[in-house]
Image: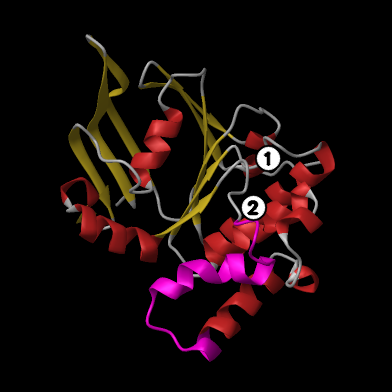
Amino acid sequence: MSFIRCMELAREYRKGENIIRPLDGLDLEVPRGDFLALMGPSGSGKTTLLNLIAGIDSPTSGRLMIGETDIAALSRSKLARWRAVNIGYVFQLYNLVPVLSAYENVELPLLLQPLSRKNRHELVSAALERVGISDRHDHFPRQLSGGQEQRVAIARAIVTDPKIIVADEPTGDLDKASAHEIMLLLQRLNQESDKTIIMVTHDPHTTAYAKRTLHLDKGQLVENTIAAHTRGEAIV
């Protein structure tokens, strides 16, 4: 059984007298442990789909099952609690709080949970170590490179041990070398920790790190591509 199931999923907005439908009756199944890349032109619905799966937005119609939970049917307060436990979000522009250190940024999601200071410290330290940025724990975002900021953002996304990581253009603001490091990190999280990852990207090079790529256009799936390395070819 698929871990994530979108059934006739639709999202529409009103813009003046016009109705905009970034998603229009989309069907999608994602198995647990998948690493899925979403591609498509601007306005194709890929970020809308990402935000629906992350519980940041709610569909206009259709069903969205994650495990045994229909998150489309949850109230706003229940959805927020569900999201805090199940979702880690990685943004293109990192979304770090500039007045907080790397450690404090990673700690933020844990402040919503009933944990002792000692437990929070253990979890934050482990997350920073996991992404290879523990030696910068006391640095502020302005003191970090783009790649280091994104590592901190990924540590923040995984510190609660979520089942799903959603990433919106995670390498869009990085140079080639930093982008490669970040994608290897996401790939390791997928392969070694069995995290289900759904990534939006415009860069065809980053899709090589995913297990498969889906192409969206006008709110519909139009193509499914299996990554080369899943057929035994190495990434270089």
Q: Can residue 68 be seen in this view?
A: no
Residue 187, numbered label: 2
Image: 216 above or below 63: above
Q: Local crowd at mark 1 within 10 Å, few (<14), some, or many (≥20)?
A: many
Residue plotted at (55% across, 72% down): 107
Image quadrant containing the C terminus: top right
The residues colored magenta run 97-119
Residue plotted at (44% across, 19% down): 43
* Amino acid tagged 2: Gln
Of 47 and 142, nearer the camera is 142
| Residue at mark 1 to residue at mark 2: CA–CA distance | 13 Å
Residue plotted at (81% across, 37% down): 176
* Amino acid tagged 1: Thr
Of 45 and 75, nearer the camera is 75
Of 163 and 78, nearer the camera is 78
User: In this rendering, would 166 be left or right of 75?
Assistant: right
Q: State the residue position of label 1.
A: 171
